[in-house]
Image (cartoon, coloured by chain):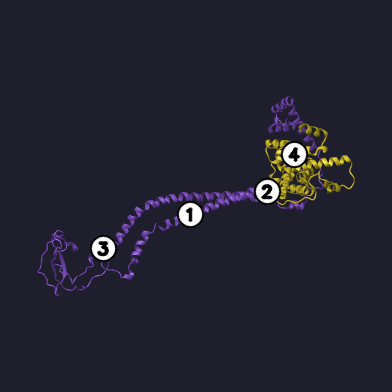
Amino acid sequence: MKSRISPKDWILLSSYLDDELDARDKARVEARLKAMPAFQDALECLRCTKELLSRMPALGAPRNFTLPAYMAKSEPSSALRLVPALRWSSAVAALIAVFFMVSTLLGGLPFRMQMAAAPADMAAKETVSLMAESEPAAAEEAAEPPVIYWNGPPVREVYGLGGGAADGIGGAEEITVPPAVIPTQPVQVFKVQPTEAPLAEAAPQATPTIVATAPLRELPVEGSGPILGIAPTERQGEMLPETERQVLPLVASGSPAQEEQVRKLPLFGIIGIGLFIVAAGLFLTAFILRKKALR
Amino acid sequence: MDEAGLIQDAVRGDLDAFNRLVLAYQDMAYNIAFRMLSDEGAAEDATQTAFISAYRNLASYRGGSFKAWVMRMVTNTCYDELRRRHRRPTVPLEPSNPEDDEEIESPSWLADGSPSPEEQIETRELEAAIQHCIQGLPEEFRAIVIMVDIQGFNYTEASQAIGKPLGTIKSRLARARMRLRDCLSGFGELLPPLFRLRGEAER
């Protein structure tokens, strides 16, 4: 009998009992009540329950609950007054958070593009600056090049023995050969002796071998500067202060402003997230306070 | 009593006007609180707290049924008390089962010093049985049954007082009545003959 009445039917019957159905539902229920005895029994059951409940005696209030003046004096919902302020604070915090997050997301993009375009530009600038820096030195070098003199000043008049490009004097220039100057010190003489090949088929021609006939003399090294200035062993591998000054700025990624911007990017993100949390917290507090105050 | 005028005065801060409204609704508020909490002291506290809360939040009253608005304060205060009880449960000194033999020695019997007539005893027993069944309902069902079937609210007022849509009120009320019917049928002899016959027929 019960199985014929669905939960929806119980709701309909309960509402019918309280006369809370519209005309269409009411007519439908009445038609089923006439057709189905189980439906009528269910309605009677609900009616009995309702009647029993309505028999419960009404209790009178044991005392008056009127509010004395001291209760009325207390601040009416001071927490409720905070709600608008909390809501506004939440909104402002959320806006600032959005600003920081957008700055982080979009602010990094143009900067990265700028960085990507920078190498060529920077390289060009660096080349120009290096050239500008090296020009005076080069001019000085051209004016007074460091020259190593072997056994005293060379015989400048003799050209054409070593390429002839030194000192800007080329082969095109007319050369007048003065009489040779005999050096004051004895010249080392090297004898070239042909060596016999151990195997005729392996070396058909004799290879000349240089053999010193006199001990090598240490020659004075004249001049100074970067050409043959080999640092002592303990100082090898060190970076010279001048080189350091010139090279390090080139190695750095960008200008100080750009570096500052790079450092600030993750900081902005953290601030944004923090502000989002603050905004959510404020909103939640306002919501809870309002809920509690309305109770 | 011009309720609308009293409400307007109360909203403007007239405590006397508000107290006149309190006097008009305090019985109903106390009844609901007592049926919800099943404890006189707690019902008193809840009623007083609800009226204080109502006075402090008069600015949030947006018209409509003032009775439903005040009773919403009462039911919410009762929900708070019930939640507090759930967090800190206590063991009652009275036996909760009215069929228990210890019921004879319970303070509810000893409270009334004069001997009661048999009919009065039956009424009290039936009332205790109904109260017991109401207490067995889930809180959200309990408030609706108390308001509609005991206090005589219509569905719209109950909807405003509970803060739920009409469909929810209808559904919860029907289910609450079915549960109460099942619970009450267990009390057999206490029930009126009509209810007993229906119950037996259904079995």
Residue A35, horizontal then vertical, whole percent: 73, 24
Task: Give the alpha-carbon distance from disc 4 to disc 2, as whole Å.
Answer: 25 Å
Q: Nearer the viewer, mark 3 or mark 2?
A: 2
Colour of chain B as rendered:
yellow
Badge 3 and badge 2 both on one subunit:
yes
Name the residue that disc number 3 marks: A138
Badge 1 and badge 2 both on one subunit:
yes
Three-letter amino acid code of the residue under disc 1: Pro
- Chain coloured purple: A
Task: Give the alpha-carbon distance from disc 1 to disc 3, as whole Å.
Answer: 46 Å
At mark 4, the secondary structure is helix
Q: Nearer the viewer, mark 3 or mark 4?
A: 4
Three-letter amino acid code of the residue under disc 4: Val
Q: Nearer the viewer, mark 1 or mark 3?
A: 1
Look at the numbered discs 1 and 3 and tell me whether their residues touch, using CB distance below 8 Å: no
The disc placed on residue B145 is 4
Tell me the subunit letter for badge 2: A
